[in-house]
Amino acid sequence: MWNTSVKIEYIAGLIADALENYSVNGVNAQFNQVIEELRNHFTNCSEEEITDIISLCMKMYSSKKIEHAELVLTAPDSFRVKALRTKDTMRNLIENTEKSLTITGYSISDYFAEMLDVIIKKSQQGVYVRLYVNDTEKQKEVLDRLMSYRSRFLQIYEYQKQEDDKMAALHAKLIVSDVKKSLVSSANLSYHGMQGNIEMGFLIESHDKAKQIEEVMKEMVRMKVCGKYQ
């Protein structure tokens, strides 16, 4: 029979994994195993008490997610402003993603091609990549390249033109990494977005804010504001 402390550590690991996967993928299949282990270990607990234990763990998990924000800037190097640089921040977010990556692109140019290679590689390593694009016709060359690597880990969505407002667009520019870090910026995925223009945004470290963004994007697909690019 297992030592009690070892068993508790094992269950704690299962709960941590279940919470991490739930925050990234929005599924809770792993919780069935957690519940079964809790039942076996805490034999005197009722079903309600087991549920309370999991709820308590979820609250503790959420409370540890510290929110933090830093200014992200595109500007000449001569600017005497202490801030993260847009290009470096985007690169670091993409390269360090381990589970999921959400990107919106109002304008994507060949200048971003180097990062596309990293995005493709990430998807081939099992990272879920979802790219939301505004005007696919203007970015067809870039998207066709990505489409040749499309898989369940790499999906591309396009903004559907609105019949009642031809000028409406998917104008948001953001990157969400692992439902933990979000870059919300005015910068497009282009040369001027990275170097030529004056662009500003924030890198936000917050599970709650990142999850909110993810929920908005999923709602756009559910409401057919965005559809899969074919």
Image: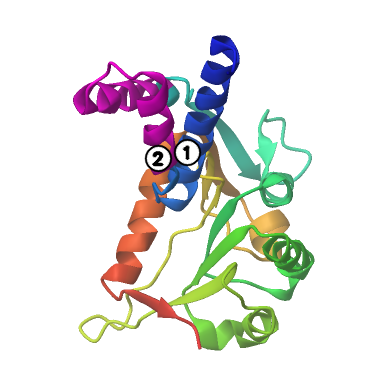
Q: Residues within 10 Å of mark 1 (few under 14, many from 20)?
A: many
Task: Answer yes or no: is residue 58 visible.
Answer: no
Which x, y percent locates residue 204?
Answer: 51, 36
Which x, y percent locates residue 101?
Answer: 58, 55
Residue at 51% over, 88% down:
230
Residue at 57% over, 34% down:
71
Q: Secondary structure at mark 2?
A: helix
Q: Is residue 20 above or below residue 58?
A: below
Specify start and end residues of the magenta stretch as a single range. 31-60
Mark earlier in primary sequence (1, 2): 1
Task: Answer yes or no: is residue 80 visible.
Answer: yes
Q: CA distance from mark 1 to mark 2?
A: 6 Å
Q: Amino acid at mark 1?
A: Ala
**Disc 1 + disc 2, Cβ < 8 Å:** yes
Q: Amino acid at mark 2?
A: Phe
Residue highlighted by disc 2 = 31
Residue at 38% over, 72% down:
169
In magenta stretch: residue 48: yes
Compare residues 72 and 55 and report the one nearer the observer.
55
Residue at 56% over, 71% down:
152
Picture quarter with the N terminus = top right
